[in-house]
Amino acid sequence: GAVVSQHPSRVICKSGTSVKIECRSLDFQATTMFWYRQFPKKSLMLMATSNEGSKATYEQGVEKDKFLINHASLTLSTLTVTSAHPEDSSFYICSAWGTGTSGGAPYNEQFFGPGTRLTVL
Amino acid sequence: AQSVTQLGSHVSVSEGALVLLRCNYSSSVPPYLFWYVQYPNQGLQLLLKYTSAATLVKGINGFEAEFKKSETSFHLTKPSAHMSDAAEYFCAVSNSGNTPLVFGKGTRLSVIA
């Protein structure tokens, strides 16, 4: 249980185009999801917090008009990189906060997706 | 604000030797602490977590970590390194289950045959 998927796993696009990345909680409902970005050989930096049914909260320095986040359901959040440029090339990872039981044991934690590698040419 | 400091961006050990990856945290509230491993071009895999229960936490693949409040530390150890342990390791802290994680800069572990 408690699996988070991301689609696509890899995407290559041309500069100026938009790319949508999906983050799904497969077997639990997630009212809160987080989007992180990881540059090569660097750590993960929080981009935004996505709450179902409301506007995302962006971290300082993250352009909300460039990185559009939509959390329309309890199992899906999307990140759209608009007018992508080569400097947007990065590894994008989402996490979903879930509560419940797994194997009889309660959990209250975040589960990470496998990540999406975006390359903008 | 919370923060995590991982001492040593690169640690190299011999196969079979002790692995020690250091993590110190700063938090104004009782923290949730995590260790993740990341293999090249892959996502994060949770090794273990501390959420205010036992201070010595056992994780997967033989790893364990001890929460020491007096030292604000959560160092990761493994008695005997295996070649497959070579990866990037991240320590992270959060306030609770539904708040974002703050990650350290990571420590790359190399295992020498």
Image (spheres, grey):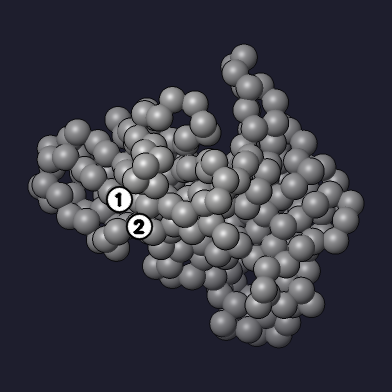
- Secondary structure beneath dot 1 equals strand
Label annotation for residue B22 = 1
**Residue B107 quadrant:** bottom left
Looking at the rendered structure, the kind of residue marked 2 is Gln
CA–CA distance in space, label 2 to label 1: 6 Å
- Secondary structure beneath dot 2 equals strand
Residue A115 visible at all: no
| In this picture, residue A49 sits left or right of residue B33 | right
Q: How crowded is mark 2: few (under 14 residues within 10 Å), some or many (20 or more)?
A: many
Looking at the rendered structure, the kind of residue marked 1 is Arg
- Residue at x 60% of width, y 18% of height: A105
Q: Where is residue B36 in the image (x, y as percent from the top left)?
A: 43, 46
In this rendered view, identify the residue nearer to me: A64 or A78: A64
In the image, is residue B61 above or below residue B8? above
- Residue at x 26% of width, y 53% of height: B109
Same subunit, labels 2 and 1: the answer reads yes
Q: Position of residue B84 (x, y in %)?
A: 26, 42
Q: How crowded is mark 1: few (under 14 residues within 10 Å), some or many (20 or more)?
A: some
Q: Where is residue B56 in the image (x, y as percent from the top left)?
A: 36, 29
